[in-house]
Image (spheres, rainbow, N blue to C red):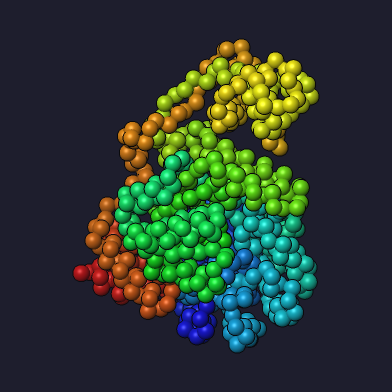
Amino acid sequence: MKTGTRFDIIFKKKYPVEERYAPITPNEILKQYFGYDSFREGQTEIIDALTSGRDALGVMPTGAGKSVCYQVPALLLPGVTLVISPLISLMRDQVLALVACGVPAAYINSSLNDTQYAKVMARARAGTYKIIYIAPERLLTPSMQELALRLEISLLAVDEAHCISQWGQDFRPSYLDIPEFVRALPVRPTVAAFTATATPRVREDILRSLVLQNPLAVVTGFDRPNLYFEVKKPKDKYAALAQYLRKRGDDGSGIVYCSTRKEVEDVAERLQASGHSAARYHAGLEDAERSRAQDDFLHDRVRIIVATNAFGMGIDKSNVRFVIHYNMPMNVESYYQEAGRAGRDGLSADCILFYARRDINTALFLINKSENEEEIARNRQLLNHMERYCECDVCLRGFMLRYFGEKSDTDCENCGNCVGVFDEIDISVDAQKILSHILRLNKAGCRFMFTHTADILLGKSEDFTDLSTFGIMKGVPRNYIRAIVNRLIALGYIQDSESKFSTTPRAGEVLRGDVRVTMRGQKPDSAEKPPRPAKQKASYAVSDNLLIKLKALRLEIARKELVPAFVIFSDATLVDMCRKHPQTAEELLSVSGVGQVKLERYGKHFLRLLRE
């Protein structure tokens, strides 16, 4: 962050909690400062628990309003709320948004120079801030511990709490310092933990590691209905990307994730050469270039950012309309979190994964670099689940929801597998061969992973040569066997425990021929696909011309204030302005996302345009 300008905007301007509003209830806080009329699912329960002094764990999908769950209590409770956050960009965006809403907030991390750091610490000691964001690595530093002893800390909120679990995809060892920090405080504050992606095992880790006391646990679900999911298997990934971008036109910003730095460089260079507004981002770049690329993306100076997974956690940009994974991620948690950076404003967005079998080899290479055998085994198991997602022919949304422990038995009609055009292939005979093979191995006391299981079926193994199913599928493509195994797992005929297979009691239905087993086969790309379901299309009737003008005004104000455009108003708020077309200040307050502070700060500019 540059010394001076943006620091001045964030920290020197004083936006105290205005006495004339004097909001005393959660709903008044929500409307006056954040501009919303009602809370979303789970928010009220968590806020009530935290304001009454009870610990809480909130597992809520990206865009569901996790930050509101601790920001509203922070304005109701005495003293200060500390928020532990993993990334500089996340803290900066959150503080910018809070300051824009009139909430005194600051952050403490390595982006501050010595002078800035001293000023923030002095103002914190003076009680200037209601909310302070801090990096976990700073918790046990002498200066922070000295400050913590002086402050009245009412609430400690742990954002991205999955980082404390070694089963989480973004494990950060410094998160393990949080319990020690809490124990050293003269009075234990209420502790709250929040995350968007956590399996039951990770949730247990969070509760145990943070030593939450009698916590309220709220899991609102993982579904993001506004996101469209699809897995594509293109022969030429770049050609598929270029075709997708041509069809989209200039509709919104997007992220293209690549697994290697080399691929990031190649894709970004080709996009730029084709005239696309694109930037690159990976850990091999100089800090200044990475920071510039991120700022350009957040401030809408570039439309597309091509990046490794080093980019994105905590990015609060609300108008990302598509996330393309150029390569398969190494686990479902990472994929769902990265894909979930699309459509944070609740409007429609695309999450598309380009899948090729060589992606698995790349992932295995990265996994096997570890010297920890337990870690290698764990990551291979997670990779197997990701592979099944890419190969499955069931509802993609349902697959992910079940992975996170949520029931989902119906098709979503908003993913590639639900709306695509497929052929049904009868695989009953081959399914019987595979189930018979696994059953015989199980009777011999053996449960193998896919590779060994398939080697025996293909006659490529040096053991079990006397088994009646040895070589029974000789000459069959391994990928075909893998696809059938994934299908049988999805249908409940094979049980996969620690990536080792066994048959279930239901397998007898297939072996006896009582049921017919089918699998989807994708028709050629030339086949015409049906249109997206209506709910994927914009559900509002607004003037495109007015929306373009509102976005232009928002961008003009944002550039004057040196903040990202979404800090002024989100796309969803501008869409609601178009829909309601307010003509007075009172009517503008009825727009979702317009609170009292933003009305006073920006209302006259937007009303002038709306009246025209």
Evaluate whether residue 406 shows in this view. Answer: no
Q: Position of residue 278 (x, y in %)?
A: 40, 63
The residue lying at 48 percent from left, 80 percent from top is: 6
Q: Position of residue 542 (x, y in %)?
A: 26, 55
Front residue of this view, candidates 344 and 113: 113
Above or below, comparing residue 76 to residue 369 in the picture: below
Image side of residue 116 versus residue 63, left or right? right
Image side of residue 64 versus residue 299, left or right? right
Among all residues in the image, which is located at the extreme left? Answer: 612
The residue lying at 67 percent from left, 49 percent from top is: 367
The residue lying at 66 percent from left, 23 percent from top is: 459
Front residue of this view, candidates 165 and 70: 165
Evaluate whether residue 1 shows in this view. Answer: yes
Front residue of this view, candidates 458 and 48: 458
The residue lying at 72 percent from left, 44 percent from top is: 377
Q: Position of residue 558 (x, y in %)?
A: 38, 74
Query: Which image quadrant is residue 273 in?
Result: bottom left
User: How many circles with numbers are drawn on the protein?
Assistant: 0
Image side of residue 462 versus residue 248, left or right? right
Quadrant location of the C terminus?
A: bottom left
Q: Position of residue 114 (x, y in %)?
A: 62, 85
